[in-house]
Amino acid sequence: KMALDGSTNLSMTVEEIRPVSPEKLRANSLSDAVADYLRLGRRREPLVEEYFNTHPNPSYGEEVATAFHEEYRRLRSEQLSPDAIFASLQSFAGGTGRDEPSHEAAVLAVLCYLFERCDIFEAPPAEASP
């Protein structure tokens, strides 16, 4: 279990939080509700990166990313809607029952981290050069 609960004091202001890629959201047909969830996770995303970078097992972050990528591919092969895939990945990360807000925030941080790295969902198409 990652130490991403509410006990960590984050000094990031709302202005410092980078927006979630609108191109990637559109490319994956994700709803505004999922975009809102990813925005919530964005605030704690640096903690996920720090956790993986300082983990005693240097390959742990890649192992987690691989597990999520494989689960994403499995869900996608089931022809689920993009929002249903996101919900299933939430359960994959945090369990099927809802938990304390700090736990839910940690789940969203992990999903946002993996979303931004393109371990889950598809990268937007590259823009054509002029």
Image (tube, rainbow, N blue to C red):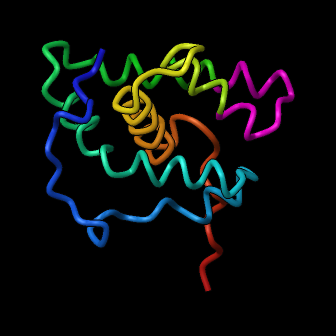
Residue 51 falls inside the magenta stretch? no
Looking at this view, name the residue that lies furthest to the right: 79
* Majority SS type along the magenta span: helix
Residue 74 falls inside the magenta stretch? yes
**Residue at (64% x, 26% y) in the render:** 72
| In this rendering, position of residue 35 left or right of residue 30 | left
Q: Quadrant of the C terminus?
A: bottom right
| In this rendering, position of residue 75 left or right of residue 105 | right
Q: Position of residue 19 (x, y in %)?
A: 44, 65
Q: Nearer the viewer, residue 123 or 105?
A: 105
Q: Position of residue 54 (x, y in %)?
A: 13, 27
In the image, residue 70 above or below residue 34: above
Q: Nearer the viewer, residue 85 or 39?
A: 39
The quarter holding residue 114 reads: top left
Query: Which range of residues does the magenta coloring cover?
Result: 72-86
**Residue at (82% x, 37% y) in the render:** 81
